[in-house]
Image (cartoon, rainbow, N blue to C red):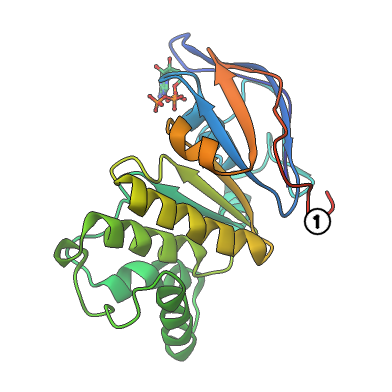
Amino acid sequence: MIRFEQVSKIYTGGQKALADVNFHLRRGEMAFLTGHSGAGKSTLLKLITVIERASAGKVYINGHDIANISRRHVPYLRREIGMIFQNHHLLMDRSVFDNVALPLVIEGFSHGEVKKRVAAALDMVGLYGKERHNPIMLSGGEQQRVGIARAIVNKPALLLADEPTGNLDPKLSMDILRLFETFNDAGTSVLIATHDLGLIARMKYRTLTLRQGRMLGAREIGEPLRRGE
Ligand SMILES: Nc1ncnc2c1ncn2[C@@H]1O[C@H](COP(=O)(O)OP(=O)(O)OP(=O)(O)O)[C@@H](O)[C@H]1O
Protein backbone atom coordinates (compact mmCIF):
# COMPACT_ATOMS: atom_id res chain seq x y z
CA MET A 1 0.00 0.00 0.00
CA ILE A 2 2.84 2.36 0.93
CA ARG A 3 6.45 1.74 0.01
CA PHE A 4 9.37 4.09 0.72
CA GLU A 5 12.69 3.37 -0.96
CA GLN A 6 15.72 5.37 0.19
CA VAL A 7 13.56 8.44 0.81
CA SER A 8 15.14 11.66 2.03
CA LYS A 9 13.57 15.02 2.68
CA ILE A 10 15.46 18.26 3.08
CA TYR A 11 13.28 21.33 3.52
CA THR A 12 14.02 24.58 1.73
CA GLY A 13 16.43 26.22 4.10
CA GLY A 14 18.43 23.04 4.58
CA GLN A 15 16.57 21.34 7.47
CA LYS A 16 17.02 17.56 7.11
CA ALA A 17 13.79 15.81 8.10
CA LEU A 18 14.15 12.28 6.64
CA ALA A 19 17.26 10.35 5.58
CA ASP A 20 17.27 7.15 3.50
CA VAL A 21 13.95 5.89 4.83
CA ASN A 22 12.83 2.42 3.72
CA PHE A 23 9.59 0.79 4.81
CA HIS A 24 6.57 -1.04 3.48
CA LEU A 25 3.01 -0.91 4.81
CA ARG A 26 1.15 -3.81 3.23
CA ARG A 27 -2.40 -3.59 1.93
CA GLY A 28 -4.78 -4.23 4.82
CA GLU A 29 -2.07 -3.71 7.46
CA MET A 30 -2.40 -1.46 10.53
CA ALA A 31 0.81 -0.04 12.04
CA PHE A 32 2.08 2.69 14.34
CA LEU A 33 4.66 5.30 13.43
CA THR A 34 6.51 6.69 16.42
CA GLY A 35 9.59 8.73 17.32
CA HIS A 36 10.66 11.77 19.33
CA SER A 37 9.39 15.27 18.59
CA GLY A 38 11.04 16.39 15.35
CA ALA A 39 11.93 12.81 14.31
CA GLY A 40 10.10 13.25 10.99
CA LYS A 41 6.68 11.60 11.53
CA SER A 42 4.58 14.45 10.13
CA THR A 43 7.00 14.88 7.25
CA LEU A 44 6.61 11.20 6.35
CA LEU A 45 2.80 11.58 6.32
CA LYS A 46 3.09 14.76 4.23
CA LEU A 47 5.11 12.88 1.60
CA ILE A 48 2.35 10.25 1.35
CA THR A 49 -0.33 12.91 0.83
CA VAL A 50 1.95 14.98 -1.45
CA ILE A 51 1.72 18.02 0.79
CA GLU A 52 5.51 17.84 0.54
CA ARG A 53 7.69 16.10 -2.06
CA ALA A 54 10.71 13.85 -1.41
CA SER A 55 14.15 15.34 -2.08
CA ALA A 56 15.44 11.87 -3.04
CA GLY A 57 14.19 8.29 -3.24
CA LYS A 58 10.88 6.76 -4.30
CA VAL A 59 7.45 6.84 -2.65
CA TYR A 60 4.95 4.29 -3.97
CA ILE A 61 1.26 4.42 -3.07
CA ASN A 62 -0.84 1.57 -4.38
CA GLY A 63 2.03 0.65 -6.70
CA HIS A 64 2.26 4.14 -8.23
CA ASP A 65 5.46 6.14 -7.95
CA ILE A 66 4.17 9.46 -6.64
CA ALA A 67 7.50 11.31 -6.56
CA ASN A 68 6.79 12.90 -9.92
CA ILE A 69 2.99 12.84 -9.88
CA SER A 70 1.60 15.93 -11.62
CA ARG A 71 -0.31 18.52 -9.61
CA ARG A 72 -3.42 17.63 -11.67
CA HIS A 73 -3.34 14.04 -10.41
CA VAL A 74 -2.84 14.82 -6.72
CA PRO A 75 -6.62 15.08 -5.96
CA TYR A 76 -7.16 11.57 -7.42
CA LEU A 77 -4.46 10.17 -5.14
CA ARG A 78 -5.89 11.98 -2.10
CA ARG A 79 -9.32 10.40 -2.69
CA GLU A 80 -7.73 7.10 -1.76
CA ILE A 81 -6.44 8.51 1.53
CA GLY A 82 -8.38 9.53 4.65
CA MET A 83 -6.40 11.91 6.87
CA ILE A 84 -7.02 12.47 10.59
CA PHE A 85 -5.34 15.26 12.55
CA GLN A 86 -4.82 15.87 16.26
CA ASN A 87 -6.73 19.15 16.15
CA HIS A 88 -9.12 17.63 13.59
CA HIS A 89 -9.35 20.81 11.43
CA LEU A 90 -13.16 20.97 11.63
CA LEU A 91 -15.16 23.93 10.36
CA MET A 92 -16.60 25.14 13.65
CA ASP A 93 -19.29 27.35 12.09
CA ARG A 94 -20.72 24.50 10.00
CA SER A 95 -22.81 21.54 11.13
CA VAL A 96 -21.44 18.08 11.78
CA PHE A 97 -23.27 17.00 8.61
CA ASP A 98 -21.56 19.69 6.49
CA ASN A 99 -18.14 18.80 7.89
CA VAL A 100 -18.49 15.10 7.15
CA ALA A 101 -20.13 15.73 3.76
CA LEU A 102 -17.29 17.95 2.53
CA PRO A 103 -15.17 15.30 0.72
CA LEU A 104 -18.30 13.95 -1.02
CA VAL A 105 -19.48 17.40 -2.08
CA ILE A 106 -16.03 18.10 -3.54
CA GLU A 107 -16.27 14.83 -5.47
CA GLY A 108 -19.70 15.82 -6.83
CA PHE A 109 -21.92 13.14 -5.25
CA SER A 110 -25.69 13.65 -5.50
CA HIS A 111 -27.49 15.08 -2.47
CA GLY A 112 -29.24 11.76 -1.80
CA GLU A 113 -25.99 9.82 -1.90
CA VAL A 114 -24.28 12.38 0.37
CA LYS A 115 -27.07 12.05 2.95
CA LYS A 116 -26.88 8.27 2.89
CA ARG A 117 -23.11 8.10 3.20
CA VAL A 118 -22.83 10.78 5.90
CA ALA A 119 -25.47 8.96 7.96
CA ALA A 120 -23.54 5.68 7.58
CA ALA A 121 -20.22 7.32 8.54
CA LEU A 122 -21.72 9.01 11.61
CA ASP A 123 -23.31 5.74 12.61
CA MET A 124 -19.93 4.00 12.42
CA VAL A 125 -18.29 6.49 14.77
CA GLY A 126 -21.26 6.51 17.19
CA LEU A 127 -22.52 10.01 16.36
CA TYR A 128 -25.79 9.18 14.63
CA GLY A 129 -28.37 11.87 15.45
CA LYS A 130 -25.78 14.68 15.89
CA GLU A 131 -25.85 15.81 12.24
CA ARG A 132 -27.37 19.21 13.02
CA HIS A 133 -25.02 20.06 15.90
CA ASN A 134 -22.08 22.36 15.37
CA PRO A 135 -18.74 20.79 16.39
CA ILE A 136 -18.37 23.51 19.03
CA MET A 137 -21.29 21.87 20.91
CA LEU A 138 -19.46 18.53 21.10
CA SER A 139 -16.83 17.14 23.49
CA GLY A 140 -13.19 16.75 22.40
CA GLY A 141 -13.67 13.01 21.84
CA GLU A 142 -16.83 13.61 19.80
CA GLN A 143 -15.08 16.25 17.70
CA GLN A 144 -12.29 13.80 17.00
CA ARG A 145 -14.89 11.26 15.87
CA VAL A 146 -16.41 13.84 13.48
CA GLY A 147 -12.91 14.19 11.98
CA ILE A 148 -12.72 10.41 11.64
CA ALA A 149 -16.17 10.22 10.01
CA ARG A 150 -15.03 12.85 7.48
CA ALA A 151 -11.85 10.85 6.79
CA ILE A 152 -13.68 7.58 6.09
CA VAL A 153 -16.87 8.89 4.43
CA ASN A 154 -15.60 8.23 0.89
CA LYS A 155 -14.26 4.79 1.87
CA PRO A 156 -10.53 5.40 1.33
CA ALA A 157 -8.15 2.46 0.94
CA LEU A 158 -5.69 4.07 3.35
CA LEU A 159 -6.23 5.91 6.62
CA LEU A 160 -3.45 8.15 7.99
CA ALA A 161 -3.67 9.63 11.47
CA ASP A 162 -1.31 12.26 12.92
CA GLU A 163 -1.45 12.16 16.74
CA PRO A 164 -5.17 11.28 16.69
CA THR A 165 -5.37 10.79 20.47
CA GLY A 166 -3.12 13.68 21.51
CA ASN A 167 -5.78 15.60 23.42
CA LEU A 168 -7.81 12.66 24.72
CA ASP A 169 -7.78 10.73 27.98
CA PRO A 170 -6.68 7.04 27.96
CA LYS A 171 -10.24 5.67 27.78
CA LEU A 172 -11.20 7.87 24.81
CA SER A 173 -7.85 7.16 23.14
CA MET A 174 -8.55 3.45 23.36
CA ASP A 175 -12.05 3.99 21.90
CA ILE A 176 -10.50 5.82 18.93
CA LEU A 177 -7.98 3.02 18.42
CA ARG A 178 -10.77 0.42 18.50
CA LEU A 179 -12.53 2.44 15.82
CA PHE A 180 -9.42 2.27 13.63
CA GLU A 181 -9.38 -1.49 14.19
CA THR A 182 -12.95 -1.71 12.91
CA PHE A 183 -11.96 0.03 9.67
CA ASN A 184 -8.85 -2.13 9.42
CA ASP A 185 -10.98 -5.26 9.86
CA ALA A 186 -13.02 -4.05 6.88
CA GLY A 187 -9.83 -3.95 4.77
CA THR A 188 -8.58 -0.36 5.17
CA SER A 189 -4.82 0.06 5.62
CA VAL A 190 -4.07 2.25 8.66
CA LEU A 191 -0.93 4.16 9.69
CA ILE A 192 -1.05 6.02 13.01
CA ALA A 193 1.66 8.51 14.01
CA THR A 194 1.78 8.86 17.79
CA HIS A 195 3.96 9.69 20.79
CA ASP A 196 1.73 7.61 23.01
CA LEU A 197 3.93 4.63 23.85
CA GLY A 198 1.39 3.39 26.44
CA LEU A 199 -1.22 3.09 23.76
CA ILE A 200 1.18 1.32 21.39
CA ALA A 201 2.12 -1.16 24.12
CA ARG A 202 -1.53 -2.11 24.63
CA MET A 203 -2.11 -2.83 20.94
CA LYS A 204 -0.48 -5.67 19.02
CA TYR A 205 0.60 -3.91 15.84
CA ARG A 206 3.87 -3.32 14.06
CA THR A 207 5.68 -0.17 15.18
CA LEU A 208 7.81 1.86 12.80
CA THR A 209 10.23 4.08 14.70
CA LEU A 210 11.93 7.21 13.41
CA ARG A 211 14.97 8.69 15.11
CA GLN A 212 16.37 11.93 13.73
CA GLY A 213 14.89 11.23 10.34
CA ARG A 214 16.08 7.62 10.12
CA MET A 215 13.86 4.56 10.32
CA LEU A 216 15.01 2.06 12.92
CA GLY A 217 14.62 -1.67 12.23
CA ALA A 218 10.85 -2.25 12.01
CA ARG A 219 9.60 -4.38 14.87
CA GLU A 220 7.02 -7.05 14.12
CA ILE A 221 4.73 -7.76 17.08
CA GLY A 222 1.73 -9.98 17.31
CA GLU A 223 -0.68 -10.96 14.58
CA PRO A 224 0.35 -12.11 11.15
CA LEU A 225 -0.90 -10.11 8.20
CA ARG A 226 -4.46 -10.78 7.15
CA ARG A 227 -4.08 -9.72 3.57
CA GLY A 228 -1.47 -9.87 0.82
CA GLU A 229 0.81 -7.07 -0.22
N1 LIG B 1 7.99 23.25 6.66
C1 LIG B 1 9.17 23.01 7.24
N2 LIG B 1 10.25 23.74 6.93
C2 LIG B 1 11.46 23.50 7.48
N3 LIG B 1 11.69 22.52 8.39
C3 LIG B 1 10.64 21.76 8.75
C4 LIG B 1 9.33 21.95 8.20
N4 LIG B 1 8.49 21.04 8.74
C5 LIG B 1 9.23 20.30 9.59
N5 LIG B 1 10.51 20.73 9.60
C6 LIG B 1 11.64 20.16 10.36
O1 LIG B 1 11.78 18.79 9.99
C7 LIG B 1 12.07 17.99 11.12
C8 LIG B 1 10.98 16.91 11.26
O2 LIG B 1 9.73 17.55 11.59
P1 LIG B 1 8.36 16.76 11.70
O3 LIG B 1 7.29 17.78 11.90
O4 LIG B 1 8.25 15.83 10.56
O5 LIG B 1 8.60 15.92 13.04
P2 LIG B 1 7.57 15.11 13.96
O6 LIG B 1 8.23 13.80 14.25
O7 LIG B 1 6.23 15.07 13.30
O8 LIG B 1 7.51 16.01 15.26
P3 LIG B 1 6.32 16.24 16.32
O9 LIG B 1 6.11 14.93 17.00
O10 LIG B 1 6.88 17.30 17.24
O11 LIG B 1 5.13 16.72 15.54
C9 LIG B 1 12.14 18.92 12.31
O12 LIG B 1 13.49 19.24 12.53
C10 LIG B 1 11.38 20.15 11.85
O13 LIG B 1 11.85 21.32 12.47
Residue 156 visible here: no
Q: Residue at x 56, y 16 (%)?
A: 213
x, y percentage for residue 53? 58, 30
Residue 128 vertical position relative to residue 58 in the rendered view, above or below: below
Q: Residue furthest top?
A: 14
Percent from the top left, x then y, of residue 194? 46, 35
Question: 141 and 54: which one is in front?
Answer: 141
Count of numbered circles in the view: 1
**As displayed, is residue 179 above or below residue 42?**
below
Q: Position of residue 170 (x, y in %)?
A: 35, 45
Drawn side of residue 13 relative to residue 167, left or right: right
Residue with the mark numbered 1:
227
Q: Nearer the viewer, residue 72 or 219?
A: 219
Q: Quadrant of residue 204?
A: top right
In this rendering, the answer to whether 36 lies above or below 43 is above
* Quadrant of the image occupied by residue 195: top left
The image quarter containing residue 94 is: bottom left
Which residue sits at x=56%, y=44%? 203
x 73%, y 33%: residue: 220
Q: Residues within 10 Å of mark 1 (few under 14, many from 20)?
A: few
Residue 49 visible? The answer is: yes
Q: Which amino acid does the dot numbered 1 rest on?
A: Arg
Q: In screen coordinates, is 86 left or right of 50?
A: left
Q: Position of residue 28 (x, y in %)?
A: 72, 55
Q: Quadrant of ligand 1?
A: top left
